Every structure is written in C-alpha cells, then in structure tokens.
Image (cartoon, rainbow, N blue to C red):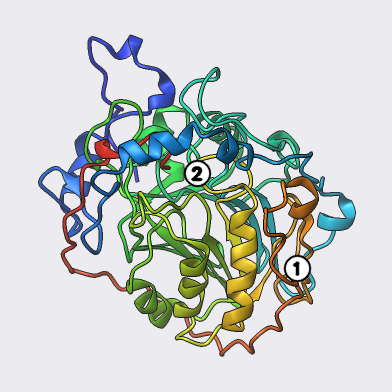
Amino acid sequence: MSGSSPRRSLFAGLRPASFGAEPTGERLERMQRSPNYRDGQFHNPVPTRTMLPGSNGPMLRRQFDRAERALRTPAGTVPVHRPTAADWGEPPASGLRLTWMGHSSVLAEIDGHRVLFDPVWGERCSPFSFAGPRRVHPVPVPLDELDPVDVVVISHDHYDHLDMLSIRALARTDAVFAVPLGVGADLELWGVDPKRITELDWQETTRVGELTLTATPARHFCGRGLRRGLRTLWASWVVAGPRHRIFHSGDTGYYDGFRETGAQYGPFDATMIQIGAYSEYWPEIHMTPEEGVRTHTDLSGGTPAGTLLPIHWGTFNLALHPWVEPAERTVAAARAAGARVAVPRPGKPFEPAGAEAVDPWWRAVAEPPAVGWPGDTAPVPAADPAPLRDAAAPTTDSVSAPVQDAGAATPQVS
C-alpha cells in the first residue's frame, strides 16, 4: 500500500532516521478506519498493561544485581552454524525448511518460496550504534550473502524486530514486504519502494506467488524513538502454501485468541513462538516458555501438531531471566505437553517433517544453575498433523479492548 510522504517538520533534520516516520495522509486514514483503532491509537484484543504497577523499583534492583547479571549472557562462545551449500543447495525434500538466524529472525523455505521474518542483522537492537542491547553471537551469514527472498514479513516496529540497516539492505533486492498497518511509513523512509509494501490489518490477507500471508492478532504494543501512543499495529502471521502452513507469533502475551487463530487457519506444520524476554513485571506482553508451548497447542485445537521452533531468545539480553532459561523451560514444557520441539543452533537449517532431536548445545556455553541442569532433553515424538484446510482470509469487525500507553514500558521490554 502506498501512503503519502513520511512526515517532515522543522526538526526533521535532527530526528535520527532510525526512529522511523509517522504515518500520514492516505496511510493514516486507512489506519483510522480499522476496527482495532480508536482514540488515536491501536488496541489489543484484550485489556493489556505493558508494565505492572509498582514494578520499577524491584526491577531496577534486580537489573544491577551482580549475580543475576552474570547469568544473562553466555559464559562461552555460542556455536553459530554457518549455512553451506549442503544446507541450502537443494530445495527441502519435504517442501518446508526453517533456519533460525537468532532472536525472531527466521528464513522459511515453504513450497518453493522464501520468506524472511523479522530480519535483524544489526549489531544492536537500538536506534543508536553506540548504545543499547548488543548481540551475544554473530549473525550466521551476512545479509548480502543470503540468497534472494521473495517476501519480508515484519511483526511490529520495535528495534529487535524492525532493523533500519537490514531493511535498507533488503530494499536493494526484489523482495516485497508484508507489514502491519502503519509500519510502511518507516520502510518508505528507509528506501523501500511503496509499490513493494503491503500493509495489513488483523485478518487481512495478501498473496505472494502461491503463498497466502495473513496478519493475525497478537497481544503486544509498538513504538520507536519519541513516538507516543500505539500509532502502528503489531501482528502475528500465518503463511500458507499449497502444501504447508506456518505461524510466526511476533511478540505477544498469552491470550485465548490463539485458539481462534488455530481454528481458522491451522493446523500448522511448524510454529515459531516467542518464549524469551518474559518477566513477572510485564506478564501481559510477552509469553513465558510454558505459555509459548500452550500457544503452540492452542493453535492445533488442544492436541499438539507440527513442530515448535522457539524464537525471541538467545541473541539479545532484553530481560532479567538467565540466558539459557527459555530453552530449558521450553523443552521441559514441550515434553510435558507431548509436543514436538526443535531448538537448533543459530543458522542450522532443519525440516520440521524430519526427526529433529533436541541437542542442548546451549549448556556448553552457559553458567550451570546452582541446582544443576533439569533432567534429560530427549526429543519428543511428533504428533500426527491433522489435514490442512484451504487458506481463508475473512475480515473481522470485532472491536478490541483498551491497552495502556506504551510509554510506560521500560527500554528492556521489546
């Protein structure tokens, strides 16, 4: 969707380009017509707080606790896998192959198409090159060495999901972009041809080749730079091809709506679910590993189907929990639920249809817990997936509930 030129002002020259642009003109008018937009901002499907009252003091004390800080980054070098021709030289035998690049960046090869979710190749997830959370491992492959992708999908505008330098590099390719409402203003500012941008509201769909891409609800918030209020939309995504379906959660808190998403668009051959950067101080905007596994199960009607790929962990230190905890808890929760989970090293491609074992590679580069590692991490057998249905994309007129202003959030929440 094309909008008018990004907003310029007397102080535009002083505003870093990494802050993005405010939606204006036709783009803003379309946003204002959304059933999820009122009073100048978007709203979540259920009432949502970005931070619980009284959290700032306890959170800051823990932030600077020396013992806790030591556990938030790897104790050794993360064993990143650099993909080779043996990994990517041939199309996936099953028709579906995923490569987790770290954090929420995933390359999905699905039914002859290449989809890149939330590409963040920058050294820091920050508007500045000199400050902000820094990578704890390098990218598996430079972006300019990545084979061309067909479509770039963005879940929302936070810095750890929408990286200006990565978008500028991808703008020089032939890829098209699928983003939530309003996010196209940032992409245009950074050099993406507006004809290559499609902005979607929840339950809206676009097609790229034989793929159907649908923006689905998520429980989160948005905001870059000095932007106030929830001025652009956030989303999870369903990508359906002739043979396979996948789901990318973006960032989200848990809520019952994932059952509806699964009933309408599932079941899925693979789900990419956020399981990191959770906290008792912001429980409504990020899921715990156990909630991530529950979401995976909800998406298949209560009986686990397909493979869960945990995302949003292991690359940036964005919360107070130990670096290794999301992976350990996800594997344990998946085993308890009878769900199949794959936790590959960054850059290691895998086919969800294959026999993917859980190799706890992270333990070799993490400080062991004082009580020791919890049990065995043997792989969980896959549940038989239910037959896929045809992709559907009806719109909804439901009105969402209020959400607290994102300005209340701490910089660690992303």
Location of residue 151 in the rendering, given as x and y in whole percent from the top left corner: 55, 51
Q: Residues under labels 2 and 1: Cα distance?
A: 25 Å
* Along the line of sight, the residue nearer the viewer: 103 or 178: 103
Q: Is residue 340 above or below residue 144?
A: below
- The residue carrying pointer 1 sits among few (fewer than 14), some (14 to 19) or many (20 or more) residues within 10 Å by Cα, namely some
Relative side of 377 to 160, left or right? right
- Residue farthest to the front? 371
User: In the figure, 201 relative to 407: above or below?
Assistant: below
CB contact under 8 Å: marks 2 and 1: no
Q: Which residue is mark 2?
A: 320
What's the residue at 38%, 65% (across, down)? 254
Query: What's the amino acid at mark 2?
Result: Leu
Image location of residue 397, percent across then percent down: 18, 68
> For the residue marked with disc 1, what is the amino acid?
Val
Badge 1 marks a residue whose secondary structure is loop
How crowded pointer 2 is (Cα within 10 Å; few <14, some 14-19, many 20+) is rated as many
For residue 363, what is the image quadrant? bottom right
Mark 2 and mark 1 lie on one chain; the one further toward the N terminus is: 2
